[in-house]
């Protein structure tokens, strides 16, 4: 007989990560579970060397790391050791699950989630999937066949998963963003910027976005020359280069990562962003006019699909990644000069905001493992 949440062991495993788009929703779900049932223990499993190994402990949760890597589409030789890493990760997962004996396992995406859910399913432990994108990943499609429940962001996912297992919840957004009451002035003072100037926020994903970074590196004088200011999250690979490019400019804040995103969203009048599902979920909640630059190498080009859906609804603008160098900053400046278009974009994107996905997901998981 499998254990339930009312037994002595009350541990739930949450597996996945790699990017903020997987990590922060996972933490939001964990927080919601803990709020609804404080007796539940949460254990995260991620990939060694990835950002979850830092961000999860910062959120107050324990995490175990796997020796695993994803398939490298650009450097095929790096995939030689992949089968061995996969085998090793399965052995690590077996040890963790046998030790913890979880009552449920939740997968949030990222390659570390696959061996965890696969092994849990072989042990007949209830498994739950959160698929944030409108185009499901191949691992989640495979895992979905034996999953207990699959939480998705939008309707129409029957083409990827068994219809009777689906539940449309939207994507979980961090409580610090959903419940933020930070004013624009407080946000701008946090970044040391002028409270009277129109402010552009650039967030190219937690790992950075090369096309966006290079466009801003080349054209940031056009932004400041027009009387605007910039909050620029570069990601670690571009951080030093970005700082060097804007040295001496006191109306540009630049760093590799913004931990307190609630301040950044409060400060921003308009946003430049990749179009990952979680970035979109946050932008819908904070109701900001956005110029999207989809990452073209995402699986099945799902970021372009995501952005195009919002453009068709009048809830965002889009510049192709390969056109960002020449077209991004002019498009942003045109939007900054058009308050009427900003207002329209705000109204349209606000209508898409979901603020309780984490609560709904947590309640359903706890209900199904009683």
Image: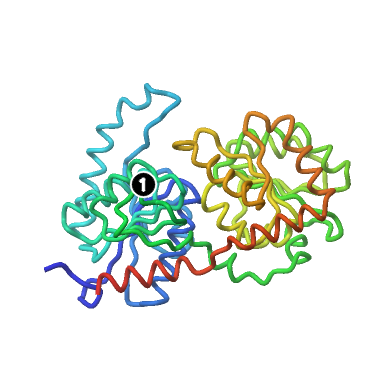
Out of 223 and 89, give the one closest to the viewer: 223
Q: Secondary structure at mark 1?
A: helix
What is the quadrant of the N terminus in the image?
bottom left
What is the quadrant of the C terminus in the image?
bottom left
Asked whether, in this view, residue 97 is left or right of residue 265, the answer is: left
The quarter holding residue 267 reads: bottom right
Residue reaching furthest to the top: 77
Asked whether, in this view, residue 238 is left or right of residue 24, the answer is: right
Asked whether, in this view, residue 175 is left or right of residue 365, the answer is: right
Out of 246 and 108, give the one closest to the viewer: 108
Q: Which residue is mark 1?
A: 159
Percent x, y for residue 274? 59, 44
Residue at 63% in and 36% down: 238
Residue at 26% in and 71% down: 10
Position of 157 relative to 104 (above/below): above
Percent x, y for residue 66? 32, 46
Out of 351 and 2, give the one closest to the viewer: 351
Residue at 78% in and 57% down: 192
Out of 204 and 89, give the one closest to the viewer: 204
Percent x, y for residue 79? 34, 27
Q: Give the crowd class for mark 1: few <14, some 14-19, many >=20 residues within 10 Å.
A: few
- The way the protein has been coloured in the rendering is rainbow
Position of 119 relative to 188 (above/below): above
Asked whether, in this view, residue 75 is left or right of residue 369, the answer is: right
Residue reaching furthest to the left: 1
Position of 66 relative to 85 (above/below): below
Percent x, y for residue 338? 83, 50
Position of 368 relative to 268 (above/below): below
- Please tell me how many numbered marks the rendered image carries: 1
């Amino acid at each position: 007989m499998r254990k339930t949440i009312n037994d002595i062991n009350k541990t739930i495993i949450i597996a996945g990560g790699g990017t903020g788009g997987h990590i922060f929703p996972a933490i939001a779900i964990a927080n919601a579970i803990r709020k609804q049932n404080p007796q539940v223990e949460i254990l995260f499993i991620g990939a060694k060397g990835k950002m979850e190994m830092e961000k999860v402990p910062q959120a107050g949760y324990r995490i175990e790391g796997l020796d695993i890597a994803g398939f490298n589409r650009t450097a095929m030789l790096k995939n030689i050791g992949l089968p061995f890493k996969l085998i090793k990760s399965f052995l690590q997962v077996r040890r963790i699950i046998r030790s913890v004996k979880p009552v449920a396992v939740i997968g949030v995406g990222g390659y570390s989630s696959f061996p965890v859910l696969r092994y849990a399913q072989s042990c007949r432990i209830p498994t739950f999937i959160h698929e944030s994108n409108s185009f499901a990943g191949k691992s989640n499609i495979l895992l979905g066949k034996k999953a207990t429940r699959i939480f998705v962001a939008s309707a129409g996912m029957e083409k990827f998963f068994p219809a009777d297992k689906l539940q449309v919840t939207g994507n979980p957004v961090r409580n610090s963003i959903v419940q933020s009451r930070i004013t624009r002035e407080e946000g701008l003072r946090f970044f040391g910027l002028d409270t009277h100037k129109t402010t552009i926020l650039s967030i190219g994903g937690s790992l950075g976005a090369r096309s966006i970074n290079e466009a801003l590196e080349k054209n940031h004088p056009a932004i400041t020359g027009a009387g605007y200011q910039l909050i620029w999250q570069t990601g670690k690979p571009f951080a030093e280069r970005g700082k060097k490019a804007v040295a001496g400019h006191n109306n540009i804040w630049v760093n590799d990562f913004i931990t307190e995103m609630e301040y950044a969203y409060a400060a921003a009048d308009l946003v430049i962003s990749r179009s990952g599902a979680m970035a979109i979920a946050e932008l819908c909640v904070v109701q900001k006019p956005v110029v999207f630059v989809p990452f073209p190498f995402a699986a099945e080009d799902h970021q372009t699909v995501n952005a195009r859906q919002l453009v068709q609804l009048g809830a965002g603008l889009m510049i192709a990644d390969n056109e960002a160098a020449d077209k991004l900053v002019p498009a942003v400046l045109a939007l900054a000069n058009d308050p009427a278009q900003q207002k329209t974009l705000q109204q349209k994107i606000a209508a898409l905001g979901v603020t309780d996905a984490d609560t709904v997901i947590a309640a359903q998981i706890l209900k199904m493992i009683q």
